[in-house]
Image (cartoon, rainbow, N blue to C red):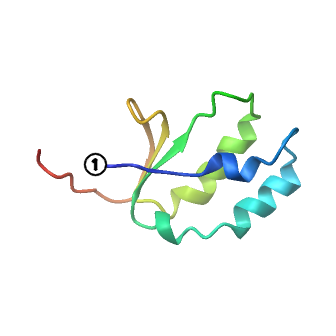
Amino acid sequence: MELIRFPLEDLLGDGIVRETEFRQRLNDLDLTPFRDQPVLLPWIHKRELPVWVYLMATAKLAGVAAVLSFGEPCSPVVLSQNRRVETAAK
């Protein structure tokens, strides 16, 4: 199963993360590429982010993604699973 990385960094802006700006960017984002796909909500190493950033992104993606995971591609943690995703045999 290949995870599609959610572009969280693109929603943050520069400097301090402000809730109203983040919420607007998140609402304006086209979620079509993530619909019924396994999605990774990445942990951002470079910045200390408020927990609400991850919570708002999770709430937005949980109803769209087939599987929503958090963390790093090498060891993701499943947060939400809306349907079974078939994995290709290797």
Q: Is residue 17 left or right of residue 68?
A: right
Amino acid at dot 1: Met
**Where residue 2 appears, x then y in whole percent?**
33, 49
Q: Is residue 36 left or right of residue 58?
A: left
Residue in front for this viewpoint, 90 or 75: 90
Would you name the residue on which mark 1 appears? 1
Q: Looking at the rendering, which quadrant does residue 53 occupy?
A: top right
Q: Residue at x 66, y 42 (%)?
A: 54
**Where residue 25 appears, x then y in whole percent?**
76, 61
Q: Is residue 40 left or right of residue 46?
A: left
Q: Looking at the rendering, which quadrant does residue 30 occupy?
A: bottom right
**Where residue 24 appears, x then y in whole percent?**
80, 63
Q: Looking at the rendering, which quadrant does residue 61 occupy?
A: bottom right
- Which residue lies most toward the left here? 89
Q: Is residue 15 left or right of residue 67?
A: right
Q: Residue at x 28, y 56 (%)?
A: 84
- Tell me if mark 1 has few (under 14), some (14-19) or many (20+) residues whose alpha carbon lies within 10 angstroms of its own: few
Q: Residue at x 55, y 39 (%)?
A: 42
**Where residue 77 appears, x then y in whole percent?**
43, 35
Report the quarter where the C terminus lies: top left
Q: Residue at x 88, y 39 (%)?
A: 16
Q: For the residue labelled by badge 1, is the local secondary structure a helix, a strand or a loop?
A: loop
8 versus 29 height, above or below: above
